[in-house]
Image (cartoon, rainbow, N blue to C red):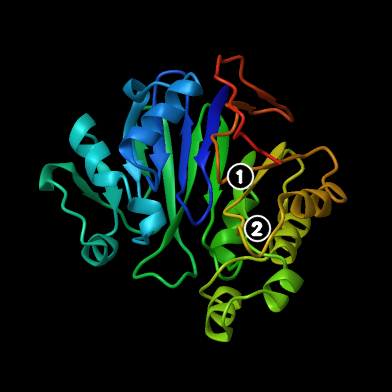
Amino acid sequence: MSLFVCSLNSGSNGNCYYVGNATEAVLVDVGLTCRETEKRMKRSGLSMDNVKAIFISHEHGDHIRGLEVLVGKFNLPVYISPLTLQHSRLKLQQENVRSIQAYQPVSIGALTVHVFPKFHDAADPHSFVVEGNGVKVGVLTDIGAACKHVTDHFKQCHAAFLEANYDDAMLENGRYPIHLKRRIKGDEGHLSNQQALDLFIQHRPAYMSHVFLSHLSKDNNDPKLALDLFNKYAGSTQIVVASRYEESLVYEVKAGNEIVPAPVKRIKTEQMVLF
């Protein structure tokens, strides 16, 4: 019993995550163009025919950039909060819109998507845990603080996309203006490497087999730095950095204490840098 997961892209240039079983899947956010989303799924051996719904976490452009075209082409339902839809200015057909509310699970075939609020500087931001086949996979990015909503769900996950946006020293000494640094570090900004690590150490369940460090800043973080930091405390959990340049491998998340890359064909490219 398992789920398949893939980061199609993770970062301020676009976010899109795939979670599904053998025949049904959901996308969380579509921050890539429709063409790029399709291209990366094809390279990963994934099919848009399996995607049954899209869930939107909030209205920022790096999470919705390709949504309108993708929905129009494939006629998919979009699960989005009314406030997020209002502030997004998306032009979606009403028949494609489904409203979400915190703590009201959504059934997509054999999958259940758990919806819960988070702290971020958006109108009505939410995070998600996708459940199926006895497995739970969290998508926990764009979080200013690891509130109880986040920690309670993280404790249940077999695998999670977990934000590790910035290194404190790199942000402090970097070129960003003070107001932007404060926004990033604030309770409605992003999680630092250390904040993400604290969440991982304090609330990781014993069966968590994989964490995908996600939404790393191009200017204020370093993939190797984040990876090395987490690996010191990883134990049996494998740590992977989700790239801002290429799709990840497809991973099979199992209900037991095991995650392995799924045996799918994909095209290697020179631009692919996972770590």
Mark 1 in CB contact with mark 2 (< 8 angstroms): no
Q: Nearer the viewer, residue 151 or 51?
A: 51
Instruction: Determine crowd level at label 2: few under 14, some 14-19, many 20+ residues with C-alpha closer than 10 A.
Output: many
Q: Vertically, is 80 above or below 271? A: below
Q: Pick the quarter of the image with the N terminus.
A: top right
Secondary structure category for the residue under label 1 = strand
Q: CA distance from mark 1 to mark 2?
A: 12 Å
Q: Which residue is mark 1?
A: 160
Instruction: Determine crowd level at label 1: few under 14, some 14-19, many 20+ residues with C-alpha closer than 10 A.
Output: many
Q: Amino acid at mark 1?
A: Ala
Q: Nearer the viewer, residue 75 or 81?
A: 75
Q: Amino acid at mark 2?
A: Ala
In percent of width and height, residue 260 lies at 69, 24
Quarter of the view holding residue 74: top left
Q: Which mark is residue 164?
A: 2
Q: Is residue 159 left or right of residue 139?
A: right
Q: Residue at the left extreme?
A: 94
For image coordinates 54% across by 32% down, the residue present is 5
